[in-house]
Image: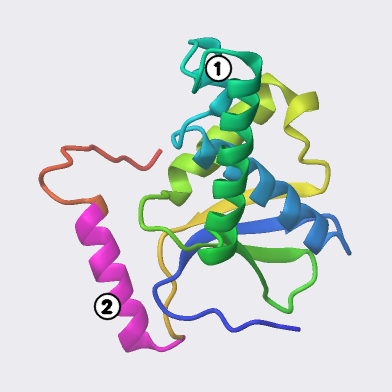
């Protein structure tokens, strides 16, 4: 069914091949989880450096098994970091970001850079465009003005010292 997109949601608007909304959404969520998981830490890195329970293979396996169980329990108990929202529009879906630390623009740029560098490994077969969404609002002039004012204030404040030009 079609989910309602609430106010002040952040995420990525994903355009895709006709009829491939879910496939494209899953592809993008997988890439986002890979990128977001990079800052969490990796069990393999700990094993490479020799930081295991007893320094043996059985200790390494026990440690890895514990980490997998803990991760599985954490995933079940917490809300997913990224959720697909069916907008009811053909060839378009929205990936909602549920954590404050995830920045739509940064993650979109990282996905596109990886796709450019290693197109065969990234696996975005059905995705056509990724459009970062900083905020959503109710479709009224008052709400849109409030959201835009807030967004422009953060992106174009005097402290950013950016210059813009129209060519």
Can you say which quadrant of the picture contains the N terminus? bottom right
Q: Tell me the tag on residue 47.
A: 1
Sequence-wise, the earlier of marks 1 and 2 is 1
Give the total of numbered labels.
2
**Secondary structure type for disc 1:** helix
Q: Nearer the viewer, residue 14 or 80?
A: 80
Distance from the alpha carbon under mark 1 to that under mark 2: 50 Å
Residue 39 % position (x, y) = 44, 34
Residue 71 % position (x, y) = 56, 47
Tell me, yes or no, if residue 88 can be seen here. yes
Q: Which residues are magenta?
A: 139-154
Q: Is residue 42 above or below residue 141?
A: above
Q: Sort mark 2 into few (<14), some (14-19) or many (20+) by Cα contacts within 10 Å.
A: few
Residue 8 % position (x, y) = 39, 73
Q: Nearer the viewer, residue 81 or 166?
A: 81
Q: Quadrant of residue 152?
A: bottom left
Residue at image position (48%, 10%) is 49
Residue at image position (53%, 13%) is 55
Q: Quadrant of residue 13?
A: bottom right
**Residue, far right:** 19
Residue at image position (59%, 45%) is 33
Q: Which residue is mark 2?
A: 146
């Amino acid at each position: 069914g079609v989910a309602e997109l609430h106010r002040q949601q952040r995420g990525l608007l994903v355009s895709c091949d006709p009829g491939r909304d879910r496939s494209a959404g899953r592809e993008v969520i997988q890439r986002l989880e890979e990128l977001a998981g990079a800052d969490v830490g990796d069990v393999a890195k700990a094993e490479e450096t020799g930081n295991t329970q007893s320094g043996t293979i059985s200790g390494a396996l026990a440690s890895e098994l514990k980490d997998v169980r803990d991760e599985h329990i954490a995933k079940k108990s917490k809300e997913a970091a990224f959720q697909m929202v069916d907008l009811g529009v053909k060839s378009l879906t929205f990936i909602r970001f549920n954590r404050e630390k995830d920045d739509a623009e940064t993650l979109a740029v990282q996905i596109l850079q990886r796709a450019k560098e290693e197109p065969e490994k990234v696996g975005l077969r059905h995705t056509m465009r990724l459009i970062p969404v900083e905020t959503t609002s109710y479709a009224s002039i008052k709400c849109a003005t409030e959201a835009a004012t807030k967004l422009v204030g953060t992106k174009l404040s005097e402290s950013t010292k950016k210059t813009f030009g129209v060519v």
